[in-house]
Structures are given as C-alpha cells and as structure tokens.
Image (cartoon, coloured by chain):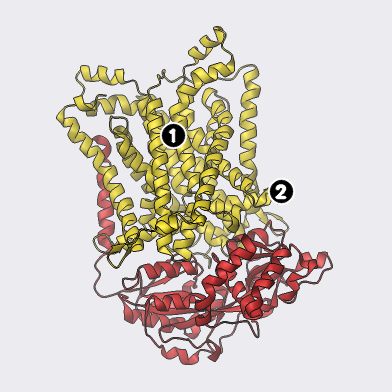
Chain colours: A yellow, B red
Amino acid sequence: MDGDRRPLTSRAGTALLAALPLGFLALFFAWPLVAILERSLVEGGRLDLPFDVLTSRSTIEIAWFTLWQAVVSTALTLVASLPLTWALARFSFTGRRLVEALVLVPFVLPTVVVATAFVALLPDGVERSVWAILLAHVFFNIAVVVRIVGPFWEGQDERAWDAAATLGAGPLRRLRLLTAPALAPALAAAASIVFLFCFTSFGVIVILGGPRYATLEAEIYNQAARAFDLRTAAALAILQLAAVAVVVGVAGRLERRLGGARRARAQRPRRPVGAERAAVAGCVLVTLGLLALPLLALVERSLAVAGGYGLDHYRALTRETPALFVAPWHAILNSLLFAAAATSLALAVGVCTSLLAVRAHGGTLDALVMLPLGASAAMLGFGFLIAFDDPPLDLRSSAWLVAVAQALVATPFVVRTLAPALRAVDQRLRDAAAVLGASPSQVRREIDLPLLARALGVAAGLAFAVCLGEFGATVFVARADWPTLPVAVFRFLGRPGAANAGQAMALCVVLMALTVATALAAERAFALRGRRR
Amino acid sequence: MTPWCKALAPLVAAAALAAAACGGDDAPTEVVLVTHDSFAVSKPVTAEFERASGLTLRVLQAGDAGEALNRALLTAGDPQGDVFFGVDDSLLSRALEGDLFVEYRSDELGRVQPAFRPPDDRVAPVDHGEVCLNVDRGWFAERGLAPPRTLEDLTLPRYRGLLVVENPATSSPGLAFLLATVARYGDRWQGYWRKLRANGVLAVDGWEEAYTQQFSGAAGSPGKRPIVVSYATSPAAEVIFASKPLTESPTATVEDGCFRQVEYAAVLRGARNEEGARALIDFMLSQRFQADVPTSMFVYPVRDGVPLPAAFREHAIVPASPLTMSPDRIAAGRDRWIDEWTEIVVR
C-alpha cells in the first residue's frame, strides 16, 4: 500500500483529515456514552459489572431474536431490492430519476406511520406477527440497497458481459462470474447498513410486534426510560454495541477485500430493447407497487374528511393546535433547517473519513464512524443529558443537539456510499498525476473529487433523507418549540380525534414530498457538477 | 488545511457560539418547565403568566410521563429546569425517593378540592384524569349488542376478542388499568386477567397503538376492536377534533372500573430560578390555568369551582366514584404486579 511512502506533508494532511471525525465522535458519541455507562455501572466508586444480566435467560432470548430477525430481514431486503436496482442502474427510461427518488420515501417515513399503514393493509393473521416485522424491515430498507449498490451496477462494463455471452456463458454464470464480484463491495456496504438498522430496530418491533417481541434496542429503551433500571440497560447497551462492532469490523474487512475488484469506466445507462423492456417494466412496477401501497393509504387518509375528500387537514397546518407549541408548518422549516445542518456536518465528517478509509490502516476510523448506528438512542440521549450540563458545553437543552444527533446517524451512510466509490477509483490515475507533479491535495481535488461527484450526490441525498426522517435519536433531544416533522407527526398521533390523525397524515405527505424533491435536487446539482468537470 | 475540512470552520464556530449563548446568565429572565409530551397550555394563558411574572416560560418536553420522570431523576440536583410537571400517583414514590423536589406549599392549595390534597409537602396537584374503558357506540349499535357496563362483563363470551389494552410495563394508562383491576379484585386480580386472556384480550405497547390503530371507534382508525382502555375525556376529544361538527360522540365511556390519576407539579431541587418556579406553580393552580386544563390537556381541573367547557359537560363524564390506590401501596406492588401481568397476558 502507498500509505507509508507518502511525504511528511501528507502525514500532516492525514492528521488534519482524521481530526474532524475523531473529534466529532469523541465529543458527541464516546463522551456521552461513557458518562451514562459510568453512571449506570459505577456504584460507590466501584465498577459493578453486570454479568448476571448478560447471562440471564431473558437476555439470551432477546439477543437471539434480535440476531435472527436482523439476518433474515437483511437477506430478504437484498433479494427484494436487486431487481429494481438492476433496472434502475442499467437502463434509462422515462421517469427513472423520479422512481429513484420515490424509493427513498419509505425510508424516511416515521415508523409509527408506516406501521399504521401496515396494520390497515395486512390481513388479520399476519398483522401482529414476526412476518409483519420482516416485511416492514424490507419496506424500509429497499432504498439503502438501491442507493448504495446502484452506482456500482451502473459502472459495470457491459462489454465483458456481452463478450462472455458470445463465448457461451449463460446468464446465471455471467451473474456469478461478472456481476457478483463487481457488486460485492457495494453489496457488503449496503448489507451492513441494513443489518445494523434491523439489528437495532425499535419502532417496527414495538408497534408491529407488540409486547411479545423485543430487540435489544427495544429492551434497553424499556429498562432505561420506563423501568429506570440503568444497570440492566447499560449491560444490554454494551452487548448491543459489542455485537455491532463485530459486524462492522467483519463487513468493513469484507468490503475492503472485495474493493480490489477491477472496475471499468462508468457506462451510460441505455434504453431497454426487446425482452428487456418487459423485464425492466416488471421489476419497476412490481417493486414500486408494493412500496406505494402503504404510501397511497397515507395520502388517502390525509385527504379524507367527513363525507368525502378535501384539503382541510393541510389548511389546518397553518393554525395553532394544542398538540404542538408552534403552528404545525413550523415543523417543515425546522426539519429542513436541521437536516441541512446535519447533512453538512455528516458530509464533512464522512468525506474526511472516506478519504482516510481507503488508505492502509484506514479501517479503524471507518468502523468507528459506523458505531453510532449500533448505539442505543435512549442511552445516548441520557448520556447527552449528563455529559453536556456545564458551560461551555451546556448543550443539553440546546435545539442544535438535534442536528448533532442526526449527523451521527447520517455519517455512516455518507461513508458507506463514498468509500466503495473511492476504492474503485483507478490508483493508476492518482499515480500518474503524482508523477506529473501534483501534490496529494491536488490529486484529491483533481482526480478523486470529480470522480466522486455522483457518489457525493447520492451520499448527500441519502444523508438528507436520513436526517429528514430521523426519529429515534431526534425525539430524545428535540425541543418542544422546535419540533421536526416526524416529531410533530408523533405528537399528533398521541392525541385522539379525526383532526389530529388527519394532520399527522398531512404532515407525512409533506415529508414524502420533501424527500422526493430534495433527492431529485441533490442528484441534479451533483450530476451537473460532475459533468462540468 | 485540506479544502474539505475548510468547509467545517464555520460549523465549529457556530457550535461554539451556540454553546456560549446557552451558558452563563445572571438574573433569571425565564422559568423552565420540565414535563412530558402530553403537556399543553394555550397561548393566551402562557402570555398572561409571562406578563404577570415578567418571566419567559420555556417548556422542555421529554417523552411520556415515565420517561420524563426518569430523565429528571438522572439529572436530580442539577436539573434541566425549575419546575417538574406530570408525575402521577403511580410514579410519585419514585420521584420522592429520588429526592427530586424541594418543599413548597402554595397558598393556592387552599382552593384545591379536598379529594386532591397532596400526599406530600413537596408536590402540588394540578389536574386529574380517569383511565376508563371506551366503547365504539356505532359498532355495538350495528350489531344490536349492548356495550359492556362493568369490568366483569369483559369476561363474557359475547365480548370475546373485542378488548384492546396497553402493556402496563410501557404505558401509563395500561398501568392504571392494571391498578384498577388490582384495586377491584384484590388478591384475585390474576384470575380476572386469566379470564380476559382466555376471552381474547389484545395487549399492545402504547396508547397510540391501542387507540389510533386497534380501536374501531377512533376517527380514521383502521382498528377492528370496539373496546379500548383510554380516558374519560376521549369521547369529548372525538367531538372537539371531529372533521365535521358532531352532536353526539362516536364513542362512550364505561363508568365502572375507571382509575383516577392525579398529576402533580413540584419545584426541582437545584432549580436556577426557584422564585420563578414557585410563581409558576401558583399560576398552575390559579383559576386561569385550571380553566384551560380540559381543552389543552384533556384532563380535569383540581381547583374548586372551575367550570368545564361545554363539550366536556355534554360528551364526557367525571366518574363519580373511580377506583384509587395510595402511592405507597402502588410503590410496594407495582413492579411485582407488572411481572405477574406479563406472565399471564403476554407469555
């Protein structure tokens, strides 16, 4: 690897690059987490290790359920999303960009809302079963696979595919020998994120599973926030974090090892011909139809008023309500503001991390950035309360903690989108530039960044969507006078009456529209920049 | 500095500024209320408090009643605010044992109805709400079936598979309903719940799932069960928040088996603005605030002689003799009962 041969100036650059992600994680992740663990486990100056909790039957049952449902959910998500990913990546057709943006919608919707739609749509027997949980996980996470794997599939060289076909390789053999190795790093990246999401699933489990099913995350919340048994909560939180660290480590190694696979220059998607048309149409329509069904149910409910349909619930968003401390439309602006701040932060941290992650020994930082996805939001929220209680960091009541919390969750998406793309940049290009006298930072600016433009667009869009829809961590730090859209939806759903339910649905539809609009805009902005280069 | 990290300088500066803006104020100009998500007060009422006291009222909400209390306990002695509101009888012992509050006896306590006088000098009652069974009137009318009238009725075969309740481990009304059955049946409460289980009771984690997703009577709900554990005021809420004016509520309260929850406010130990905290508690007990309690929070005032809004007089009941339980008895039995309930209903 080239890391050791770099000149000293590059070492300084490395330190500068590392400073931001490390500082960010140390301040807003490690410190609050250590603070709450210390409070939970240190009794009278003595560390009280909760081995009894870890070995109890209930813990083992919960851990087992958490693990197997995450594995199955991830597998199902991969299988369900590949047809659409293929169609979107390889072919151009009318409405392609819109479909790409629409796929993001389920991902940002608050779990409470989607679960409501699921309860309404699923038949009685399935409604409160493990099948409902698995189905909901697939529904939520399809976007992750489509978004992360898509750019890779787009970049695959079709000439090799055609050549193999000419030489007599059947489609399955071609998939195994050509497509699978090329996609492997991106698949590993996407699978690791989907797995982490399902492993730490909370809302889906609580609402669709009911009291019978608990993941570690749900049980940590119950113990910390309801029973106030911090010792048990801390034990489970450590277990969850350790499991996540293992998964992140393995997935990272896998992604890096697979990242060496050669990659040709990006191809332009072409229009499907002949039988491809039916296949593409089928993939798009079936997946989109399944995704759209619950969403359309929400739109329908947002428009339903007594004796017909109307815009009453939308008009009501401008009026004061007892459910919130501000008129509901404020939540729209708040969401955009926080998401913009959090996305900037996540992009800055994520870009620095990714640039380092592709070097030798970059894996540690890469893995560290992923950890917040595996930390219990409840424990981290509690940690914020006791860690940031003194000036100059008296932040615990600050509205800006929302942006910080969202950035913690969004950064892994940035890194998982950028790092595989960066690794795929041909090292010979960088070497050639260096030979011609370019400094390391010039190489990054002139080679890496332009090639990354599209990946950056995807990362920005994905991060913004994550921030818009983030609920689990946001709700722990959101201030009553600064609600985000998902928080406002949650408040409305917490009150009886048709008007409250209707306004909750109207806000959800606004959230969907914002997601589609910002995803399209981000893509366009970055695609243009990429082309200009 | 690399170009990418240059972009960060403004962010770091902004964070530092935000931090500076939050720290170090001398004369208190605001009073901070720490409470749960269900707290609400109308704008004119807040404005009146701010005018009279010269203080700005800031509200910090943190989850449901249990979560808000636990967050306050975590910061006991170095609180996020000055007043805590929203601890009820079922959790009061936890707050008092946690040494969360300092003593304050407001002069306004003299105007509180005798039934709600506080059990401890550190807390002041602000409102009471009754957790009651609600029924979907239309559902029962359509089938020519009489809705249940007592707790005992719920075990009858004709109400099989119709009831949805909340998990007492995770929901405040769920716990209240469990306490109601313990208060009613004493040592035989487990037998009652076994019968409910045999009769197809559905337990979900929270009120939102129970009421807005499983209960058929809530407007816009996809639910199929016509009996739910909710509040005595829910039928009035269905009228007030209806999409078109209603003369009658689509739901009704079952008067038997209601459990009373009294919510208290208290001055937090270590409050930065203790004087402002006392003023806020006085205000919460005043006629003005108490009259606002029903329409803002859908609970009832505790002060004597506060008139109820018309919608509450017409569509909601104040249960005449609700079941109650002393905070001490709740504290002694709560965790054990929840564990036993879980064994009986969930496993």
* Mark linked to residue A352: none
Chain to which the residue tagged by mark 2 belongs: A
Provide residue A129's location: percent of width, then percent of height: 64, 50
Q: Is residue B252 left or right of residue A409?
A: right
Q: Compute the Cα span from label 1 to label 2.
A: 34 Å
Q: Is residue B80 above or below residue A414?
A: below
Q: Residue A189 got which mark?
A: 1
Q: Residue B171 placed where, x, y %?
A: 55, 66
Please state if A400 lies on the left or on the right of A138 as rendered.
left
Q: Nearer the viewer, residue B180 or A151?
A: B180
Q: Quadrant of residue B255?
A: bottom right
Name the residue at the right extreme: B144
Amino acid type of disc 1?
Answer: Ala
Dot 2 amino acid type = Pro
Q: Residue at x 39, y 70 (%)?
A: B73
The N terminus of chain A appears in which quarter of the rendering?
Answer: top left
Q: Which residue is mark 2?
A: A123
Q: Secondary structure at mark 2?
A: loop
Asked whether B260 or A313 is in front, the reply is: B260
Residue A396, visible in the rendered structure: yes
In the picture, residue B260 is in which quadrant? bottom right
